Amino acid sequence: MKIALLPGDGIGPEILREAVRILEALRSDGLKIETEEAPVGGAAYDAAGDPLPPSTLALAKSADAVLFGAVGGPRYDTLPRDKRPEKAILGLRKECDFFANLRPATVFPELADASTLKPEVVSGLDIMIVRELTGDIYFGQPRGITGEKGSRVGFNTMHYTEPQIRRILHVGFRTARQRGRRLTSVDKMNVLETTQLWRDIAEEIAPEYPDVELTHILVDNCAMQLVRNPRQFDVLVTGNMFGDILSDEASMLTGSIGMLPSASLDANGKGLYEPIHGSAPDIAGKGVANPLAQILSMAMMFRYTFGLADVAGRVEGAVRKALASGLRTADIAAKGAKPCTTAEMGTAVLKAL
């Protein structure tokens, strides 16, 4: 199993370090794991003037899976847009065709009180958001800003092809089939023709999955329902922009964005695995970041790319044991409780493993 390690910026290297400790333990247990590290994001720009150097992209393409930390930071915000760290993750998604993003939102029993919502609303929550990653307004052309000051116009294009919509909907249906057999397709068809096409295609595909119940919901209502009654959902499938927003909203149902992993898959199961949080430059280097989303992303790697559900289960079980021991990083610690460090949480997971 060849794994590319791309730490990135901010807290990326710190949290990836803890995941690598777990990898090394699994390698000692007999798993044949090979890793290679490369710079990405701001770190790559600093080293090579490019957030996604050709050598890093080549490594990502040659590896079986990619473990990704986080990229970005305020000191890069004034760079030309094609040189900013965020171009690295967008470039990886496009160049490797990582079109299907799986973002689970699960509330561990030990963290039901960490959510800002009442425990009775979020206890037992287990939903999966399937987000399309390579189309929509993030990639559509034309885009830009024109005109003189005082009369400038900014424009972006929401654009989806039928093949793009069909393949992500199939991922949504297959994912629902493996879970509770309920799929909710999220759109804004009452306003946007792009998402009318999305709903039409969902209805065309549905008969191929007679064992899956398909429902539709408008994105604004979905955002409200995620806060009102999130457990009504099993699998949500949606486009790039809506998925970006809804998955961040769902992260707070779990208590912290530091708890949510993700997988970005191509058509053959190769994937890029990353926590959904950002680089958090304000806490970088302080040893206080939560490494659990990164470790859980690694667990998803074993499940979805390598087909090793038993290994994934071991890692996830170790995370639960670490939480059951009472350890909490600052983002999930109760008010007044002393938080643990990044390394202490990683050590606890390693010990539980």
Image (cartoon, helix red, strand yellow):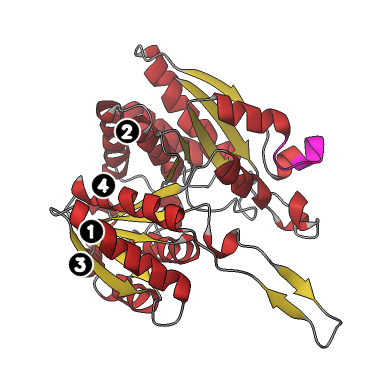
Residue pictured at 81% horizontal, 40% vertical = 49
Q: Which residue is mark 4?
A: 174
Q: Which residue is mark 2?
A: 303
Give, as a three-letter code, the residue at label 1.
Answer: Ala
Q: Residues within 10 Å of mark 2 (few under 14, many from 20)?
A: some
Q: Nearer the viewer, mark 2 or mark 1?
A: 1
Q: Earlier in the sequence, mark 2 or mark 1?
A: 1
Q: Which residues are magenta?
A: 45-53
Q: Residues within 10 Å of mark 3 (few under 14, many from 20)?
A: few
Q: Which residue is mark 1?
A: 206
In the picture, the disc for residue 232 is 3
Q: Are marks 3 and 1 in contact (CB under 8 Å)?
A: no
Q: Is residue 70 visible?
A: no
Q: Residues within 10 Å of mark 1 (few under 14, many from 20)?
A: some
Q: Nearer the viewer, mark 4 or mark 1?
A: 1
Q: Nearer the viewer, mark 3 or mark 1?
A: 1
